[in-house]
Image (spheres, helix red, strand yellow):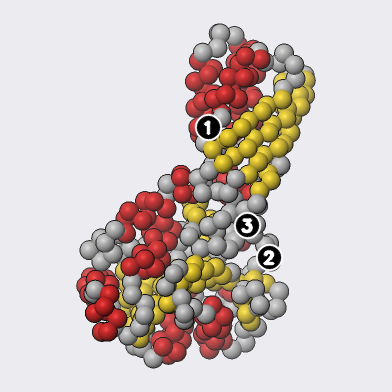
């Protein structure tokens, strides 16, 4: 494997990417292997978008290699509240990202490798890509019992999923990306991909649970670098190109003009949460106040990540009806988000009479409401 200097690579890649489409189609051919210098999930997803939107793939295919710091990545048409434990992710500072491809939810950390195969739509073939990965792994460790399933997963020992797959098909270009579990933290993976939220009804695409295993559990002598090199080598062999991995800085506007705008868009609340398909929440919870246990029923409709309609059924006279009505009114149109709900409830509380018992009840209700989010 040859890792050229980052600066030299940037110049080289800039020449390739900035060539006008007609000229590039005639001049460039073969394949290109690139690897991100960043471990930021938003930067790396932005690179996928940039290549898909701007690069002429008519006579050139691209393999993009990338790894992320801890993050949960949901599919384009998924519901994050349905797929993961958002509260735990906030506590652990684990990022949430929504990609532009379909498919299910995955956990990324530095023990996970991501591979993206770019082609024209006509040449798109995810099964061939996965077979390439399996061939590379078996060339490195022939004893590995791995195969590709009809669902486009890669299984280890015929039962453990080590790779999931998703794709985006554009009008003329396409990409297929897959994960490869090397040495990911399975305890964190299991915890964050377990939704604690009850009473959700949604038509969003659900993930399919699977038993997973790390490749390093099978062979501790492996490293992520060895696997990346083996896959790059197999890709180069099949596409008859030099085995060079070009390093790119996914925030470099001189190489990827407009890339930072794409990255910022992927980080917005409107994209991550606002693109969630419409869903409803119908749930009950208990509140312990002094020596009493109270049953509270909450119904909400959420559209574009915002509360469209809300009803809170409390025991009669536990709170002043006017105050409860004001909360429901304030929640309608607000983000289905604990931060915004806390801010709203604090604002309303300041308008209440100075009554310690009333304030205690109000804080208890609002605390339980935020736990639904």
Q: CA distance from mark 1 to mark 3?
A: 24 Å
Residue to which mark 1 is pinned: 333
The reply to whether discs 2 and 3 touch (Cβ–Cβ < 8 Å) is no
Mark 2 crowd level (few <14, some 14–19, many ≥20, 10 Å Cα): few
Give me the residue at 44% from left, 84% from top: 235
Q: Is residue 85 left or right of residue 282?
A: left
Mark 3 crowd level (few <14, some 14–19, many ≥20, 10 Å Cα): some
Sequence-wise, the earlier of marks 1 and 3 is 3
| Residue 205: assigned label | 3
- Please tell me in which quadrant of the rendered image residue 367 appears: top right
The reply to whether discs 1 and 3 touch (Cβ–Cβ < 8 Å) is no
Q: Is residue 284 above or below residue 225?
A: above
Q: Is residue 243 left or right of residue 104?
A: left
**2 or 3: mark nearer the eye:** 3
Q: Is residue 276 above or below residue 155?
A: above
Residue 5 coordinates in the image, percent (x, y): 26, 74
The reply to whether discs 2 and 1 touch (Cβ–Cβ < 8 Å) is no
Residue 174 coordinates in the image, percent (x, y): 45, 72
Sequence-wise, the earlier of marks 2 and 3 is 3
Mark 1 crowd level (few <14, some 14–19, many ≥20, 10 Å Cα): some
Give me the residue at 54% from left, 42% from top: 305
Q: Is residue 63 above or below residue 108?
A: below
| Residue 210: assigned label | 2
Between 193 and 124, the one lying in front of the other is 124
Sequence-wise, the earlier of marks 2 and 1 is 2
């Amino acid at each position: 494997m040859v890792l050229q200097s980052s600066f030299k690579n940037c110049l080289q890649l800039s020449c390739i990417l900035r060539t006008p489409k007609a000229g590039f189609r005639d001049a460039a051919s073969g394949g290109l292997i690139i690897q991100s210098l960043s471990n930021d999930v938003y930067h790396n997803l932005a690179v996928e978008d940039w290549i898909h939107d701007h690069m002429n793939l008519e006579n050139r295919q691209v393999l993009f290699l990338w790894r992320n710091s801890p993050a949960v990545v949901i599919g384009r048409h998924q519901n994050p509240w349905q797929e993961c434990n958002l509260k735990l992710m906030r506590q652990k500072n684990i990022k949430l990202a929504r990609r532009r491809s379909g498919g299910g939810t995955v956990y990324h950390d530095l023990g996970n490798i991501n591979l993206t195969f770019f082609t024209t739509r006509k040449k798109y073939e995810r099964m061939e890509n996965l077979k390439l990965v399996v061939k590379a792994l078996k060339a490195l460790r022939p004893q590995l019992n791995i195969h590709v399933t009809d669902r486009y997963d890669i299984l280890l020992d015929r039962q453990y999923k080590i790779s999931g797959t998703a794709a985006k098909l554009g009008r003329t270009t396409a990409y297929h990306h897959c994960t490869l579990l090397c040495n990911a933290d399975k305890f964190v993976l299991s915890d964050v991909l377990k939704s604690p939220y009850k009473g959700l009804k949604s038509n969003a695409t659900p993930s399919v649970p699977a038993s997973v295993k790390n490749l390093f559990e099978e062979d501790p002598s492996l490293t992520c670098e060895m696997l990346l090199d083996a896959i790059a080598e197999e890709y180069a062999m099949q596409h008859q190109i030099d085995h060079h991995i070009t390093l790119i800085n996914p925030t470099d506007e001189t190489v990827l003009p407009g890339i930072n705008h794409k990255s910022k868009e992927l980080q917005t609340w409107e994209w991550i949460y606002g693109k969630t398909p419409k869903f409803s929440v119908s749930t009950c919870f208990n509140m312990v106040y002094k020596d009493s246990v109270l049953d509270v029923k909450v119904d909400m409709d959420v559209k574009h990540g915002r509360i469209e309609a809300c009803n809170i059924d409390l025991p009669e006279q536990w709170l002043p009806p006017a105050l409860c009505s004001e909360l429901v009114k304030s929640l309608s149109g607000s983000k289905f988000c604990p931060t915004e709900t806390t801010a709203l409830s604090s604002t309303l509380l300041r308008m209440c009479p100075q009554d310690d018992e009333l304030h205690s009840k109000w804080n208890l209700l609002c605390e339980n409401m935020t736990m639904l989010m």
